[in-house]
Image (cartoon, rainbow, N blue to C red):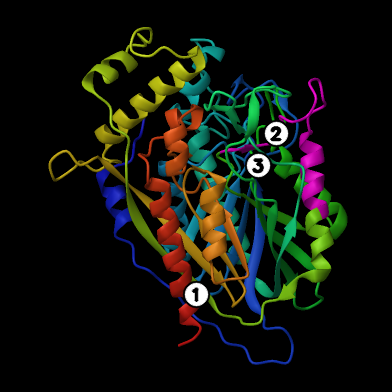
Amino acid sequence: MHMLTTRTFSILVFLPIIFFTLSVKSAQPPTVYAGVAQVDITPPPNYSHYRGVSTGIHDPLFAKAVVFGKGEGRFALVVCDLLWVERELSSKVRLIVSQEIGIPYSNMIISGTHSHTSPSYHLNIDELNAGLRPASYVAPKIEGEDYPDWLAKRIAKAIMDADKASDKVYLETGTGSAEGISFNRRSILADGTVRMNAGVGNPAIVGPAGPVDPRVGIILLRRTSDKQPIGCVSSFGVHADTFGGTEFSADYPGFLAKALKREFGEGFISVFGTGACGDINHIDVKAKKGSKRLSSQEIGETLATAIQEEVPNLKPVAHSFLAARSEFVYAPLQQYSDEELAWALPEKQDSLYHESAFLTRRRAVKIRSLHWMRQTGEAIAPTIGKSPWTIPLHVQVFRIGDDAAIVGLPGELFTELSMAIKEASPFKTTLVVELTNSHIAYVPTKRAFSQGSYETINSRLAPGGGEMMVASAIKLLKELAALGND
C-alpha cells in the first residue's frame, strides 16, 4: 500500500531548516517576488473515481501553486483538487522541483482540497469504495503513463510555472467571514453520546459537539506594475463533499475560483487551501426535514463574496520579510492486537465489533493501514517497553511579512485544533491548511477521542497527536515572529 523507500524516508526526516530575509525601503508598500500558476490534472473520463469509476468530467481539476521569494529561500504552496496527497506523491513532487529549480524540499507544502469527486489514484483511496469498481477494472493510462506518475509531474510543473511567472507584487492580507455554510457535523444526543451526521431535524440532538470557525484567511497578490490582482491565497474549513455523483469535479473550490475570475479577470488564480474540516460539513442539522442542502455553487460563491467584500479592508503587508520553518512531530499511532489484525486482513468482520457495516469497514481499513505503515517503514517502532509506534508528521510554517502566516499540517484536522493555532499566532492573519504531504486520516482532539464516533474510529493517530502538531505550529510561528525583531 505504501511504497515509500527507506532512502526516501531519510530524506524526509533530515532536511535543513531554511529562512531568508528581503528588505525594501520605500514610501510605497514593500514589494516581494511571487508568482502563481495552475496546471490541469484531470484524468481520462473513465479513470477510477472516489465513488467507483468516473462517468465524465463536470469541471476540470487543477494543481494551483504560489511561490514566494527568490533564490534558495523560496517557498511554495500548491493545492490540488484531490481527496488527499499521499506521502509518496508529495515526496516525488518535492524531489522533482528541488532538483529542477532548487526550491528546498522542506519549503514546499503540497495539499489536497479533499474533493470527494476526484480520482482514486492510490490503493489507500481504492479500498474505501472497492466494491463500486468491477473486479476486472484496469485504470487507463494518460499520455502513455500511469496517472500517478503523470500527476506528480503535473503538480511539479505547477510549482515551476509559478516560479517562472514570479514578478514584483504587493501583498495584502486580512480575514473575512463566511457564515451559514459550515456546521459541526458531530452532535451530542440526549443520551450523552456523540454521533456524526445525526440527521437533519433529529429531536434527540442536544447541540453540536464542537465549534465552527467562520473566518476566511486571505492573502491577495497585486502585480506592482499595474496593481492588478493576479491571485489569492485563501483558506476556510468545510468538507469538500458537496457535489456528489461520479463525474470529476473540483467541488466548491472550483466554483469559488470561477466566481473570483468573474470579479478579477480570467488570469486570476484562486489558490484555496482547505482549512480544518475534520468535524465540519455543510449540513445544518437544525434545519427542518426536507430542507434543501447548500449546493457546491452556493458555498463557493458565498466564499467568493466574503473575499470580495473584504478586499477594501485588506492591509498592505508592511514588511517584505519572508521566511519558512518546519519540523517533524513524532506523533503516537493507535495500536492494534494480533487478533484485530487477523480479523481485519481477511475481511472476516463479523465477530470483534458490533457496529454499523460502514463503521466496521472503516475500522478494518484503519487497522490494515496501520499495519502497512509498520511494514513499509512509514511508522517508527517503539524503542522502550510498550511505548506506541509513532509517525513523523511534517509541520510547516511560512511567514508573509509582519502580518500573515501559512501553516501546513497533515490530516483532516478538527476545527478546535486550527482555532487554537490562530488564537495563539503572533500574526494577524494565519491561514491553516490541512491535508498536507501525507495521509493520516482524521486528527481529532483529545476530548473528541473520549466521545468516540466515526472520526475517532477512522483516525490513525492516538489521542494527543493533534495537540502535538498544534504546539509545534505555535512554537514555529513565534520563532518566525521573533526573527523580524532581531
Stretch of the chain drawn in magenta: 279-305
Where residue 239 appears, x then y in whole percent?
A: 63, 38
Look at 53% across and 39% down and name the residue there.
84
Circle 3: residue type: Val
How far apart in space, not on screen, are marks 2 and 3 (Cα)? 16 Å
Look at 78% across and 66% down and name the residue there.
229
Q: Which residue is mark 1?
A: 71
Look at 73% across and 74% down and name the residue there.
315
Which badge, 1 or 3, comes first in the chain's sequence? Answer: 1
| Other-residue count near label 2 (Cα within 10 Å), few / some / many at <14 / 14–19 / ≥20 | many
Circle 1: residue type: Gly
Which badge, 2 or 1, comes first in the chain's sequence? Answer: 1
Left or right of 92 in this view: 428 = right
Residue 100 visible, this angle: no
Q: Which mark is residue 238?
A: 3
How far apart in space, not on screen, are marks 2 and 1 (Cα)? 36 Å
Q: Secondary structure at mark 3?
A: loop
Q: Nearer the viewer, residue 94 or 320?
A: 320
Which badge, 2 or 3, comes first in the chain's sequence? Answer: 3
| Other-residue count near label 3 (Cα within 10 Å), few / some / many at <14 / 14–19 / ≥20 | many
Which quarter of the rendering shows the C terminus?
A: bottom left
Residue 289 is one of the magenta-drawn residues: yes
Residue 180 is one of the magenta-drawn residues: no
Q: Which mark is residue 249?
A: 2
- Identify the residue at the far left of this view: 385
Camera-side mark, 2 or 3: 3
